[in-house]
Image: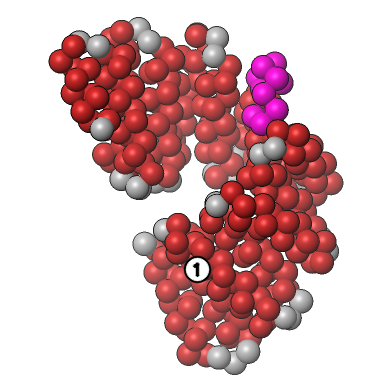
Amino acid sequence: MYQRASDLAHTTGNHRQQAGALISIGQCHRMQDEFGEAAEMYQRASDLAHTTGNHLQQAVALIGIGECHQAQDEYGEAAEMYQRASDLAHTTGNHLQQAVALTGIGECHLLQDEFGEAAEVYQQVLDLAHATGDRLQQAEALAGLGHCHLLQNEFGEAAEVYQRALDLAHATGDRLQQAVALIGIGGCHQAQGRFGEAAEMYQRASDLAHTTGNHLQQAVALTHIAECHQAQGRFGEAAEMYQRALDLAHATGDRLQQAEALTGLGQCHQAQGEVADAERCLRKSTELFDG
């Protein structure tokens, strides 16, 4: 349908409509992990938007290209696209789209362990979201800041920021963002050896993610519950959680989350003397990490 819309818009010379259709086609490809095809559609949309002087539409297309690079661990290229998108969105005065682009830059910094740079960008996003009154965007930015603190072992600061994110997400009714914040709070407890408190936060996150149908976020929460069991020597309970997380991650096609669950599952088998099962899980995990 989107291709037909693009073709029709092309015959009428309506570049704005054609660019919009190409962006939608790109999104379809990206959701199927067809990043090359997606990037091609986004680039065509960006070129068309540029010819019409539609800076906002061009920014949306560039964000799409950035997401394709980011999904393939090409963080430098992704950040460049996000920055161009942010600059264009800024010229239009569209704070929301600028915040989306900046969030992408923050994620790229975070994924490269550039915590100071990431925190600076997330603070910019928070300021923009505050100016527009977008509480959900504020919650997402605060969660990003929480990640920066947590990964630098600043657990008090992280927990405080995650709690603010949780409160805002709760106020908006966004259950997925609540789950993200709860996982962050759980991570603060877990890192300090408070496994009971951590598991409670993770379970709440899992329940919320389940209600939204977000299997990947639920798999993340269950993996962390398993880690808490494993750290306390409860290998049977841990293996059960890892298996549930593995099944959910497999359903989403997320290879990294599958690999993490398989690694934990293999370690549990190994701890219980189940050598063959441990070897099978760990070999498969390695294949997924390398693949």
Q: Which residue is mark 1?
A: 247
The main secondary structure of the magenta stretch is helix
Residue 261 position, x and y percent, is 55, 68
Q: Residue at x 30, y 33 (%)?
A: 25
Q: Is residue 43 or residue 19 the one in the foreground?
A: 19
Residue 44 appears in the picture as rendered: no
- Disc 1: CA contacts within 10 A as few (<14), some (14-19) or many (>=20): some
186 sits to left or right of 92: right
Q: Residue at x 62, y 52 (%)?
A: 211
**Is residue 128 found inside the magenta-colored segment of the image?**
yes
Q: Is residue 103 or residue 18 the one in the foreground?
A: 18
Residue 189 found in image quarter: bottom right
Name the quadrant of the C terminus: bottom left
- How is this picture coloured? secondary structure
Taking 206 as reference, is 239 above or below it?
below
Name the quadrant of the N terminus: top left
| Callout 1 amino acid | Asp
Start and end of the magenta stretch? 127-138
Taking 180 as reference, is 76 above or below it?
above
How many dots with numbers? 1
Residue 33 position, x and y percent, is 35, 47
Q: Is residue 261 or residue 174 the one in the foreground?
A: 174
Q: Residue at x 50, y 68 (%)?
A: 247
**Is residue 56 found inside the magenta-colored segment of the image?**
no
40 sits to left or right of 258: left
Label 1 SS: helix
237 sits to left or right of 88: right
Q: Residue at x 80, y 46 (%)?
A: 159
Q: Is residue 200 or residue 40 the one in the foreground?
A: 200
Residue 52 found in image quarter: top left
Residue 136 appears in the picture as rendered: yes
